[in-house]
């Protein structure tokens, strides 16, 4: 029987590969270390030799038949070994790690905070949405001794997952963006979401870490007992507080430190669409202020940040203005987006909304609530996509319903729009980005 590689031995291979790790044979780096993960429909052990042939220096497998103890090494479980390696590597990093979780806007918070802190420090943050049991280890393994701060986004759809990710990432600081109705099916309802996201607070409480918290959020503040808190919000008594210009299409705000006056503070004009993004930007200002980034650099970073990847991204086409918020959706984020859009002084508003996923037994009620909100906000030009919305077609016949994005794209190809402002929001699986080319 082949000898199982220890975590310490694995770390030595990791160092020999200059911290280059890959899990995908389609995206191999020369001289990297390949982890042969298994999924529901694949077993990457079968690609280990191919990975070596294509330039990887080492491969890690949990199938003894493909190991050779020369370039392909055996472990009991590849995923567990990847996570153990990340934990081992984290302990050698003498830098602060900021852990971020929450129901909405995790990635936006991460990117804004990264932009601000990068004005003073060498920062590594979660790339894209690599925020799960595989992505968090990969994020940590990409942090080098040259980095000065790490930002680790943590996603979850079940209780216990954030606790596991905290054990791997060992954050010193934490941020829960909010507690909303997301992944209700996996978490077991709203209280399950609160408990699951609160695992970050629990970890930091035991570690005597610190948290950044929106002190105007009653739910979050109730969860902070026994924690060292750095507060932000609308009250002058918070560590950082601010005020926004609500009538502006984009987020514009000013801020200052505790007990200092807002008068004569510069107005920060961002490219963030939607008033709900104000608190996200204020959070980034709070984090930057805590870590000693100058006020000018904080403001410059926030003003320069450009949303992308269909997250509150404004795109002007030849014919229309699109507000792309189609990366994801849940009842909480959908409600906020609709309220904001209703309050904007814009001409010819149109809504394109896709189903919200992972709501389980709550799905029917939550989709009906959104439809009732559309009625109460007096939206007239509404296009709804997906079977969860389709279930209500008889009761809300004033709206137009489509089975999928392809059907809606076909509709727009025959019925083109011009001079409209169109909010596009839905869960990632609906693929609403398919319609962009037709608008």
Image (cartoon, rainbow, N blue to C red):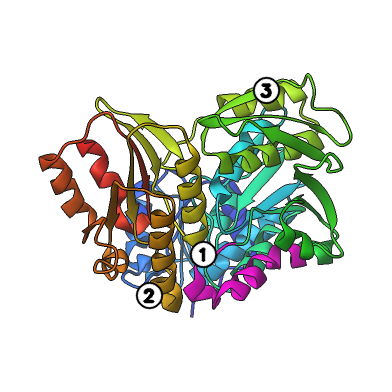
Please name the predominant secondary structure of the magenta segment in the image. helix
Q: Look at the image and say whether residue 182 sits in the magenta stretch.
A: yes
Q: Specify which label sits upstream in the sequence, 3 or 2.
A: 2
Measure how far apart labels 2 and 1 are at the Cα level: 42 Å
Label 3: how many Cα within 10 Å (few below 14, some 14–19, many 20+): some
Circle 3: element type: loop
Please name which of the two marks, 2 or 1, marks the residue nearer to the observer: 1
Kindly identify which residue carries mark 2.
Answer: 65
Viewer-nearest residue: 291 or 134: 291
Q: Is residue 3 positioned above or below 209 on the image?
A: below
Residue 360 percent location from the top left of the image: 42, 76
- Which label lies toward us, 3 or 2? 3
Magenta region? 180-202
Q: Is 425 colored magenta in this rendering? A: no
- N-terminal label among 2 and 1: 2
Residue occupied by mark 1: 182
Residue, x 30% and y 52% (percent of image)?
431
The answer to which quarter of the image holds residue 5 is: bottom right
Examine the image and state in which quarter residue 191 appears.
bottom right
Figure label count: 3
Q: Position of residue 320 (x, y in %)?
A: 29, 30
**What is the quadrant of the C terminus in the image?**
top left
Sequence order check: which comes first, mark 1 or mark 3?
Answer: 1
* Residues under numbered marks 1 and 3 in contact, where contact means CB atoms less than 8 Å apart: no
Which label sits on residue 267? 3
The answer to whether one can see residue 95 in this image is: no
Whether residue 90 is visible, yes or no, is yes
**CB contact under 8 Å: marks 3 and 2:** no
SS for tag 2?
Answer: helix
At 52% across and 45% down in the image, what residue appears? 127
Rendered residue at 79%/27% (across/down) = 262
> Label 1, label 3: how many angstroms apart (C-alpha)?
33 Å
């Amino acid at each position: 029987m082949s000898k199982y590689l220890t975590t310490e031995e694995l770390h030595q291979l990791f160092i020999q590969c200059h911290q280059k790790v890959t899990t995908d044979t389609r995206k191999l780096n020369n001289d990297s270390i390949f982890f042969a993960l298994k999924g529901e429909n694949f077993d990457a052990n079968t690609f280990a030799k191919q990975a070596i042939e294509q330039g990887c220096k080492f491969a890690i497998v949990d199938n003894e038949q493909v190991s050779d103890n020369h370039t392909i090494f055996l472990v009991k479980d590849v995923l567990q070994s990847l996570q153990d390696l990340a934990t081992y590597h984290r302990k050698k990093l003498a830098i602060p790690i900021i852990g971020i979780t929450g129901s909405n806007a995790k990635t936006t918070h991460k990117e804004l905070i990264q932009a601000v802190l990068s004005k003073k420090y060498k920062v590594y943050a979660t790339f894209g949405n690599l925020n799960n049991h595989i992505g968090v280890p990969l994020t940590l393994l990409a942090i080098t001794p040259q980095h000065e701060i790490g930002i680790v986004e943590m996603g979850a759809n079940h209780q216990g997952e954030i606790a596991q990710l905290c054990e791997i990432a060992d954050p010193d600081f934490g941020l829960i963006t909010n507690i909303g109705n997301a992944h209700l099916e996996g978490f077991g309802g709203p209280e399950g979401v609160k408990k699951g996201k609160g695992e970050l607070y629990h970890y930091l409480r035991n570690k005597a870490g610190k948290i950044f918290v929106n002190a105007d959020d009653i739910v979050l503040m109730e969860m902070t007992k026994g924690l060292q808190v750095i507060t932000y919000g609308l009250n002058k008594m918070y560590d950082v507080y601010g005020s926004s210009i609500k009538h502006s299409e984009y987020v514009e705000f000013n801020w200052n430190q505790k007990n200092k006056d807002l008068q004569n503070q510069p107005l920060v004009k961002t490219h963030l669409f939607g008033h709900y993004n104000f608190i996200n930007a204020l959070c980034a200002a709070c984090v930057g202020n805590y870590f000693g980034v100058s006020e000018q650099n904080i403001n410059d970073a926030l003003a320069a940040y450009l949303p992308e990847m269909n997250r509150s991204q404004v795109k002007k086409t030849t014919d229309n203005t699109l507000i792309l918020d189609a990366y994801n959706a849940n009842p909480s984020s959908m409600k906020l987006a609709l309220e904001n859009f209703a309050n904007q002084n814009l001409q010819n508003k149109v809504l394109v909304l896709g189903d919200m996923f992972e709501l389980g037994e709550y799905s029917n009620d939550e989709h009906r609530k959104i439809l009732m909100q559309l009625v109460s906000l007096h939206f007239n030009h509404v296009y709804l996509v997906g079977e969860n919305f389709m279930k209500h077609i008889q009761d809300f016949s004033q709206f137009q319903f489509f089975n999928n994005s392809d059907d809606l794209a076909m509709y727009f190809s025959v019925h083109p729009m011009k001079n409209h402002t169109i909010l596009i929001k839905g869960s990632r699986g609906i693929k609403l980005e398919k319609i962009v080319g037709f608008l």
